[in-house]
């Protein structure tokens, strides 16, 4: 699939370990989830002024062009602020004058923008696209517009296994807030382009029983058992029979977008049985249902699984209306 990971930080509590909500996250230091700090009034990931810190990411296997994007708000800083980095150092840096410096995976500067691209204290949507072809180059967009003519030529790709969001040493760094981080590549048939324009991640929570309620709830109802404000764990539901399906109604979108790229389902699950088991995310409206490819459920500890629906249960592109009407859930395979 093209969409690899995304996080709007609204599913995390203030003391969050990010990896509890998405296995692509790694070690974190110095950053905290901050309520009402985000671009759209939700949570942000914040690094305090003069703090040392970063959040590690590992997108896993990527194909072709790899793209990094997110909203960034940087307070006045007298030193450069690394927004993205890998094992060689900063990949994307915001200088004190608001200019942006882009490097490749060998630490070679490929271009530097004019000043005031990322203004002090202003949310800026920044996209950086590293093209898989050695001659295709690197493209950068700010607020949806091309920042510079693309760098065209050979370059060393970043080390995706050692990717970091922020990588501050603290000195001369103002407060940094990040929201709606998205990573994707050019595989698949959806969400595989660069220059996608500013995007917003909205978090929807279960609020009603769906058409199918076949897993046993540990709480009062199936939807109440799977709902929680963060990834600390809810009551949960239990499936034991092959093919059992649980679906839930969800809260509506809080803002109406012009288009919907995808709906991403995430669930924290664990196999506590003696046999191997799989989970397939499903979406449905009434009797119409579509399932994604089943994935194995870990036995050692609860793990967050992710499924991406680029189209609805009828294989039609999403609209705000169909998102609001859809149910989501899971089918057990044993």
Image (cartoon, grey):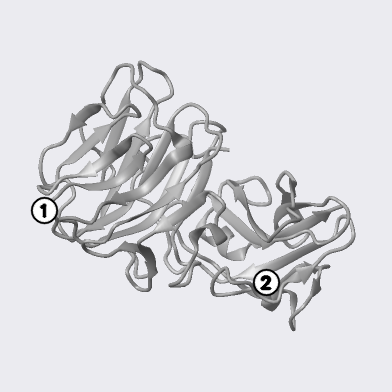
Query: Compared with residue 333, is residue 236 higher up or lower down, i.e. above or below?
Result: below
Quick check: can you spot residue 51?
Answer: yes
Q: Is residue 76 above or below residue 100?
A: below
Assess whether mark 2 and mark 1 are in contact (beta carbons under 8 angstroms): no
Residue 21 visible at all: no
- Which percent across, then down, holds residue 177? 29, 61
Q: Nearer the viewer, mark 1 or mark 2?
A: 1
Q: CA distance from mark 1 to mark 2?
A: 46 Å
Residue 36 quadrant? bottom left
Residue at disc 1, secondary structure: loop
Q: Is residue 126 left or right of residue 79?
A: right
Q: Residue at x 84, y 50 (%)?
A: 276
Crowding at dot 1, Cα within 10 Å, few <14 / some 14-19 / many 20+, comes out as few
Q: Is residue 102 left or right of residue 249?
A: left
Residue 78 has which mark?
A: 1
Residue 12 in the image: state x and y as whole percent: 49, 67
Q: Residue 122's spot in the image, x, y percent?
A: 20, 59
**Percent x, y of residue 100:** 19, 41
Between 113 and 148, the one nearer to me in the picture: 113
Label located before the other in sequence (1 or 2): 1
Q: Residue furthest bottom?
A: 220
Q: Residue 158's image quarter?
A: top left
On the image, numbered disc 2 is attached to which residue? 226
């Amino acid at each position: 699939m093209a969409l690899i990971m995304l996080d709007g930080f609204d599913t995390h509590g203030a003391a969050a370990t990010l990896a509890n909500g998405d296995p692509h996250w790694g070690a974190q230091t110095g950053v905290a989830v901050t309520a009402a700090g985000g671009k759209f009034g939700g949570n942000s990931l914040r690094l305090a002024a003069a703090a040392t810190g970063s959040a590690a990411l590992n997108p896993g296997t990527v194909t072709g062009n790899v793209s990094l994007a997110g909203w960034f708000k940087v307070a006045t800083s007298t030193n450069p602020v690394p927004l993205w980095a890998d094992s060689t150092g900063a990949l994307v840096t915001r200088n004190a004058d608001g200019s942006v410096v882009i490097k490749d995976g060998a630490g070679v500067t490929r271009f530097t923008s004019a000043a005031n691209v990322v203004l002090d204290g202003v949310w800026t949507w920044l996209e950086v696209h590293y093209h898989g072809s050695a001659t295709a180059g690197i493209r950068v967009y700010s607020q949806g517009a091309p920042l510079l003519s693309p760098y065209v030529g050979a370059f060393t790709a970043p080390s995706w296994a050692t990717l970091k969001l922020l990588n501050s040493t603290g000195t001369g760094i103002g407060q940094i807030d990040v929201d709606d981080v998205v990573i994707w590549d050019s595989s698949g048939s959806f969400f595989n382009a660069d220059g996608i324009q500013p995007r917003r991640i909205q978090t929807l929570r279960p609020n009603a029983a769906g058409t199918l309620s076949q897993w046993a709830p540990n709480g009062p109802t199936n939807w109440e058992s799977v709902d929680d404000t963060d990834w600390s764990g809810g009551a949960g539901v239990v499936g034991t029979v092959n093919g059992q399906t649980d679906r839930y109604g969800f809260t509506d979108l809080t803002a109406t977008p012009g288009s919907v790229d995808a709906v991403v389902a995430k669930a924290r699950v664990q196999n506590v049985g003696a046999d191997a088991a799989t989970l397939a995310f499903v979406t449905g409206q009434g009797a119409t249902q579509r399932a994604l490819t089943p994935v194995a459920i870990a036995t050692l500890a609860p793990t967050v699984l992710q499924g991406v629906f680029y189209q609805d249960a009828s294989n039609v592109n999403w609209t705000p209306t169909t998102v609001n009407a859809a149910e989501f859930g899971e089918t057990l395979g044993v």
